[in-house]
Amino acid sequence: MGFPLSKKLYQHVQGMIGFHCPACDTMHFYYTDEYEHPGPKWEFNGDVENPTFSPSLLRSTSIPRNEAEKENPVWYPQCHLFVIDGQIQYCSDSPHALAGQTIPIPDHNRQLVGNED
């Protein structure tokens, strides 16, 4: 259902490019200009070894945290980051242990590719 573009990037479908996020332990995907998607799209510099995507990526979840949210879902930030020159720059508002840190994009592997957003 997709293929590796490099050790760091994976193409799910034409113009939908992802990488493994170690903070969330899953793949995060960007919809680029080449993807027919009605929602937001990101600019990609075309470098599969040292990619840059802009603007930032904000991944949210609506998993209920209490009984009231089961009937009225609330969206919470799960991961907020920039990818610049092959580095993941986690924003300080990310609610995980890598918030505020910058790390290289790790290599993905086939086991992780099946765990897509």
Image (cartoon, grey):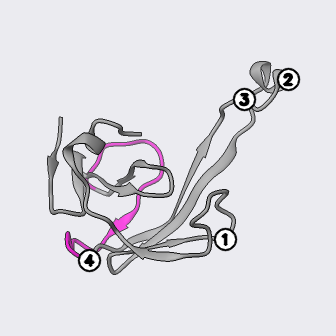
Badge 1: few (under 14), some or many (20 or more) residues near its Cα, within 10 Å? some
Residue behind mark 4: 50
The disc at residue 92 is: 1
Badge 4: few (under 14), some or many (20 or more) residues near its Cα, within 10 Å? some
Q: At which x and y percent is residue 4?
A: 15, 53
Q: At which x and y percent is residue 45?
A: 28, 74
- Residue ID at (29%, 73%): 51
Distance from the alpha carbon under mark 3 to that under mark 1 = 23 Å
Distance from the alpha carbon under mark 1 to that under mark 4 = 23 Å
The disc at residue 68 is: 2
- Image marks 1 and 2: residues in contact by CB distance under 8 Å: no
Disc 3 residue type?
A: Pro
Q: Secondary structure at mark 3?
A: loop
Residue 66 sits above or below residue 2 on the image: above
What segment carries the magenta color? 34-49
As rendered, which of 73 and 109 lies closer to the eye?
109
In the displayed structure, does residue 54 sit left or right of residue 80? left
Q: At which x and y percent is residue 80?
A: 57, 61
- Image marks 3 and 1: residues in contact by CB distance under 8 Å: no
Distance from the alpha carbon under mark 2 to that under mark 3 = 8 Å
Classify the position of the N terminus by image quarter.
Answer: top left
In the displayed structure, does residue 65 sit left or right of residue 92? right
Asked whether the viewer can see residue 14, the reply is no
Distance from the alpha carbon under mark 1 to that under mark 2 = 28 Å
In the displayed structure, does residue 4 sit left or right of residue 22? left
Distance from the alpha carbon under mark 4 to that under mark 2 = 43 Å
Q: Secondary structure at mark 1?
A: loop
- Image marks 4 and 2: residues in contact by CB distance under 8 Å: no
Prevailing SS of the magenta stretch: loop
- Residue ID at (15%, 63%): 6
In the picture as drawn, the residue positioned furthest to the bottom comes out as 85
